Amino acid sequence: MSNLRVCVYCASSQKCDAAYLEAAERLGRHLALNQATLVYGGGGAGAMARLAEGALSAGGTAIGILPQFMLDLEWGHKELTELHIVDDMRERKHRMIDGADAVVALAGGCGTLEELFEAITLKRLGLYLGPIVLVNTLGFYDRVVATLDHCISEHFMDERHRGIWIVVNEPEDVVNAIQTAPRWNSENRNFAVQ
């Protein structure tokens, strides 16, 4: 896993079930112990904070990508390895996934889901080729996967698109999921439109 750059999508909510916060911290620690560089949204609250703190506490590298307006609101984490300030949310998303070897989605709200669906779309179009792993804490992603399955059954996506994402139950399953993910290549865009 050494030298891998892993982009993680997660939330800043501090009101969610403690299991989600614990999963974020465990994932950060897990990535650090496997010598992966964490890249995330740079937030200093909720699962975002716990993810970074898990990585840093295990001697890992945590890189945050934060829009200027969030820095102005003092939403950024203050103890990251690196904090990059960008102009807006679009640039943040681009910078997070740019150069990522894998994408991981923890539970979250509309921002997390938007980032996840953009990554799935980019992979469908052959513009991002790495693994996409959903950490299904408390069954959070069951309905999302059911919706994607429905898109496939209604022929808005191809059956082969099921290979775009992998679902794991525990943060500690992420590294193995990344390492054993089916290979995806840009030729797969040939069945993006059928």
Image: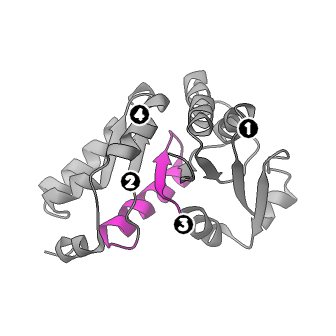
**Snapshot colouring:** one colour
Q: Which residue appears at 37% of the width and 65% of the height?
A: 129
Residue range corresponding to the magenta coloring: 98-127
How far apart marks 4 and 2 lie (CA) works out to 15 Å
Dot 3: element: loop
- Name the kind of residue labelled 3 in the image: Gly
Horizontal side, residue 174 vs residue 16: left or right: left
Q: Which residue appears at 63% of the width and 52% of the height?
A: 40
Q: Which residue appears at 74% of the width and 40% of the height?
A: 45
Front residue of 98/136: it is 98
How far apart marks 2 and 3 lie (CA) works out to 13 Å
How far apart marks 1 and 4 lie (CA) works out to 23 Å
> Residue 188 placed where, x, y %?
23, 70
Question: Which is nearer the N-term, disc 3 or disc 4?
Answer: 3
Horizontal side, residue 165 vs residue 154: left or right: right
Residue at the spot of label 2: 131
- Name the kind of residue labelled 2 in the image: Pro
Asked whether disc 1 touches disc 2, contact meaning CB atoms under 8 Å apart, the reply is no
Dot 2: element: loop
Question: Which is nearer the N-term, disc 4 or disc 2?
Answer: 2
How far apart marks 1 and 2 lie (CA) works out to 24 Å
- The numbered mark at residue 56 is 1
> Residue 107 placed where, x, y %?
50, 39
Residue at the spot of label 4: 136
How far apart marks 1 and 3 lie (CA) works out to 21 Å
Quarter of the image where one finds residue 25: top right
